[in-house]
Amino acid sequence: MTGIIGRRGMLAGAGMVFLGACSKVAETSAGSHLLKSASGWNKAIHRSLADRKALAREYSKADISPFFRGNGSLSGGTAAYDAAVENKFADWRLEVRGMVNRPLSLNMEDIRELPQRSQITRHDCVEGWSAIGEWTGPRLSGILDMAGVQQDGRFVVFRCADTLNGQEYYESVDMVDAYHPQTIVAHALNGEPLPVINGAPLRMRIERQLGYKHAKYLTAIEVVDSLENIAGGEGGYWEDRSGYQWYAGM
């Protein structure tokens, strides 16, 4: 057991150093190929050392950070989003679409009426900071089961209201992480409605992966069979633009 934990710790540390330099490495085609190869290596090693449904560590209320900073987009940044904030998200809808048998359109009341999970976990940002918070929301797996994922659905894409450099933010995971018991659609942080800087009214929590995978300002969940024809084809905003690993497991 000690050997496994030691190796996992070294891998995590190496991954953080590697990711910190990835924007420069990704500027060359050789660097981009290296990052893509490392993503597959990280995924394979991570899953060989732990059960796919092993839980991320959960903390006590005493461990909660006094302030949970925002990062990346600090607002949806559009007139439509500003109007939604003013209206306290009364008309916000979460669409569930793509390769599903029963497309859904859920409002915030629908989301809050689903079975809820609360978890106190640590958010690790690729920029090197961490914070601990209590997140509450329904499991993504329950929403997917309501919609009925079709047999050929392999990935879940998260669509967002915010844009960076003119491109809509998005992220994605495979079905293993989508059905992980700690993968939730969070609407509350530390017992209060999610603040705007943290992704109000809905954001993803994918506790086995780094922070940029936790898409904020969530508008839609889309089941697809391939990521190749979505935006840059790498599975996420930062993966398309900066060579970040698609699988950012910790």
Image (cartoon, rainbow, N blue to C red):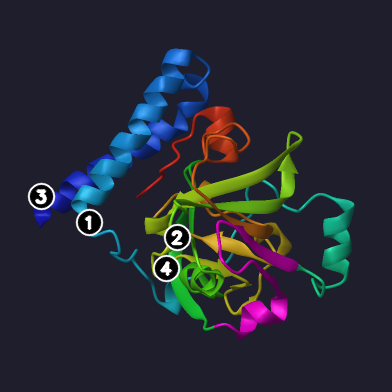
Label 2 is placed on what type of residue?
A: Ala
Q: Determine contact: label 1, label 2, CB under 8 Å.
A: no
Residue under pointer 4: 182
Q: Secondary structure at mark 2?
A: helix
Q: Is residue 39 above or below residue 69?
A: above
Q: Secondary structure at mark 4?
A: loop
Q: Secondary structure at mark 1?
A: loop
Residue under pointer 3: 3
Badge number at residue 178: 2
Q: Determine contact: label 3, label 1, CB under 8 Å.
A: no
Tell me which numbered mark, 1 or 2, is placed earlier along the sequence: 1
Label 1 is placed on what type of residue?
A: Ala
What's drawn in magenta, residue-wise?
93-114
User: Which quarter of the figure has residue 195?
Assistant: bottom right
Spot occupied by residue 14 in the image (x, y as percentages of width and height): 31, 36
Disc 1 to disc 2, C-alpha distance: 17 Å
Q: Secondary structure at mark 3?
A: helix
Label 4 is placed on what type of residue?
A: Gln
Q: Residue at x 62, y 85 (%)?
A: 113
Q: Is residue 131 left or right of residue 72?
A: left
Residue under pointer 1: 50
